[in-house]
Image: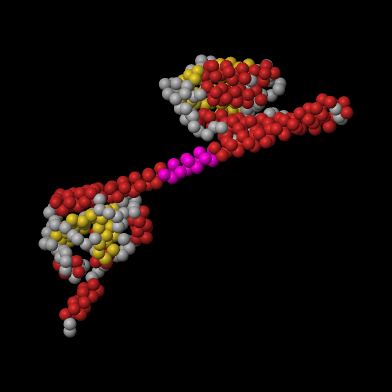
Amino acid sequence: MPEALLSSIKFDFYVKKMKPAPLPENEKERLKSLESYEILDTMPEQAYDDITSIAAEICDTPIALVSLVDEGRQWFKSRVGLSATETPRDIAFCSHAMLQPEVFEIPDALQDERFCDNPLVTSDPNIRFYAGAPLITSDGFALGTLCVIDRVPKYLSAEQKATLQAQSRQVVSQIELTKAVRDLVDLHKKTEAQANELKRSNEDLHQFAHVVAHDLKAPLRSIDGMLEILRDKYLSSLDEKAEDYVNRSINAARRMNRLIDDLLNFAALDGRVDQSAQCASKDALNYAIENIESDINSRHAEVKMGDMPSVKIKEPHLIQIFQNLISNSIKFTPNERIPLIQVAANSSDKEVEFTVTDNGLGVEPGQVDKVFTLFTRLHTDESIPGTGIGLATVRKIIENYNGKIWMTSEAGKGSVVHFVLPAA
């Protein structure tokens, strides 16, 4: 029989007699985890080469490997003393070692029935001694091993085993750190792309809002004017029902006009604010009171204030907050009551909590969490003006300055709006 054919028969005999390692129970998930690290078939890296060099030195072996086991092979991310870059999985010692929780040691492979006829033992690299520490990720998957190999039988000391185990954890840390950095870079790129897209969308939204506002407000002004002429000039010829319809139409047109203005104000708040800005809250409150003086006087409302410290916010934004909250308090106070509004502040080194207390209608318990949501009206009574945008705008302003807002209320007895801003 030719020698080459005999050699082939002998090799087949060895392979068939070998006992490949069983697959892990979580093999499908393990392979998915290994793939997620995107480490297979990558270039050598100094961080891994340093670890294999240290492992070979400490364990006094000519060969050390960082071995990763995929579906059909073991691939070496780092290797010392071996030219091969991979071997078939079914003959890999590491396929057995990664199934163990601690260091897997074979003192003499020729004396072990699992490996005595393994081609890696019977031919180059002529393995006699093997010790491998599993590379177990933080989510519990064994990706491969950090192993040391010698061509003569031997044992590792307890200290050498402990060091090999520790070095395997360093390999895993390096693998997971690389993935974390890559994920962070990907997230940054994705966030940057989303931010750019959001910026473009905001710019488009602002442009669209202004165009729509212009196109809507012109005919609204015309409708309002014509209805007023109809009511004033032809009032004597209108019956009571027709006059009511005209008045309702005028109110509807004006409410639509307020809605457009409020939407424009809300759309303008894109989150880009000057976090270093600060203002005197007492001045902002006084300006807000001046702006709605006619509403205050028409209801004989009383607005009282306590000590008002400075806060980190642009003055126009704080004026808008106070103006919205005081106007709401007046609007939602029954006509038979004089609106009483108390604005107070409680400050610390880092923040100021403002409260706006009124004696108005209050809010039902189930509505308290909804009042700062866009287009949510506190009451369905159409005789009470409002667009459902004012409080949403207030919330957006406050949150843009890293503040918070909430409400406590008792139906029929009034409400307290609390909001917090950074102290100046």
Please tell me which residue is depicted at 17% across the width and 82% down the height of the picture. 2
| Residue at figure coordinates x 34%, y 51% from the top left | 139
Residue 351 in the image, given as x and y percentages of width and height: 45, 24
Q: Which residues are magenta?
A: 189-202
- Counting every numbered tag in the picture gives 0
Which one is in front, 237 or 388? Answer: 237
Q: Is residue 80 above or below residue 342?
A: below
Please check the rendered image and state whether residue 346 is part of the magenta-colored stretch, yes or no: no
> In the rendered image of this protein, does residue 352 appear above or below residue 195?
above
Can you give x and y, in whole percent of width and height, for residue 175 in the image? 30, 50
Q: Residue furthest right?
A: 237
Taking depth in this image into account, of 266 and 341 the one nearest to the observer is 266
Residue sitting at 47 percent across and 22 percent down? 278
Residue 266 coordinates in the image, percent (x, y): 58, 32
> In this view of the protein, can residue 362 be seen by the observer?
yes
In this image, 136 relative to 255: left or right?
A: left
Task: Quarter of the image for the N terminus: give it.
Answer: bottom left
